Image: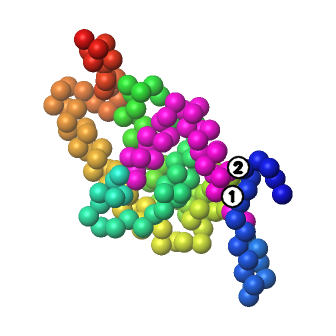
Amino acid sequence: KTKNEIYRGITEFDFVNRKVKKYLPFLNIARFNGMDQRLKGNLKALSRLLLTLQKDASEEIKLRHTEINALLYAMPEEELKVDRPNILMLLPKVENHLQRLISDDTFFNSLVSPSGMERVFSSSPEKKAELSKLHKMLQSLLIDINEGLGEDGLHIDSKIVFWDSQLANS
């Protein structure tokens, strides 16, 4: 027993097969939040974006938020370190990461949760089709963003000011 709440978990007993499976959801959350803090909010911003794309899809995308968070958590931190004005630069990186998950069976099957306790997709090969749907939604968004930015002579790698606090206070 532990007094540290992040290590408290859920134990699933399979009496038929005589197996025990442990889940540590609070550790997953703590590690995800820790990485997000190091990345100055970029990880949660990407998570919210992918969850929004999932909910806005005309065809249901059957992925849990924990699966989406785990696939983002698996991305190298260095790839996700950008300042807020450059946050759009992360979208092609996420798109490439999704493409790799879809095309590389070994990578797909070896993806682990932030706690490191369970494989995210290995027992669910049908999740690849769901990832493909999410990937298509992200590709469509990237096309729309590039078209919109192109009208202003910008591109996805441009530094874009979303909010100017000096203008807001005047």
Would you say the magenta stretch is mainly helix, strand or loop?
helix
Q: What residue would you read off at disc 1?
A: 24
Give the SS element for disc 1.
loop
Q: Residue at x 81, y 53 (%)?
A: 2
Whether residue 94 is visible to the viewer of this picture, yes or no, is no
Q: Residue at x 44, y 54 (%)?
A: 99
Identify the amino acid type marked 1: Leu
Residue 101 in the figure: left or right of residue 159: right
Q: What's the distance in space between the residues labelled 1 and 2, CA to CA?
A: 8 Å
Q: Nearer the viewer, residue 160 or 64?
A: 64
Label 1 Cα crowd, 10 Å radius (few <14 / some 14-19 / many 20+): many
Residue that lies at the very extreme toward the left in this rendered image: 151
Residue 169 in the figure: left or right of residue 20: left
Determine which of the numbered discs, if any, sits on residue 6 in the image.
2
Q: What is the x, y in percent for residue 82?
A: 47, 28
Give the SS element for disc 2.
helix
Q: Nearer the viewer, residue 47 or 88?
A: 47
Q: Nearer the viewer, residue 61 or 3?
A: 3
- The quadrant where residue 38 appears: top right
- The quadrant where residue 170 appears: top left
Residue 115 in the figure: left or right of residue 147: right
Segment colored magenta: 22-51
Q: What is the x, y in percent for residue 127?
A: 48, 68
Whether residue 144 is visible to the viewer of this picture, yes or no, is yes
Q: What is the x, y in percent for residue 140?
A: 27, 51
Label 2 Cα crowd, 10 Å radius (few <14 / some 14-19 / many 20+): some
Residue that lies at the very extreme toward the bottom in this rendered image: 16
Q: Quadrant of the N terminus?
A: bottom right
Kindly check if marks 1 and 2 are in contact, taking CB atoms under 8 A apart as contact. yes
Q: Is residue 28 magenta?
A: yes
Q: Residue at x 42, y 37 (%)?
A: 90
Identify the amino acid type marked 2: Ile
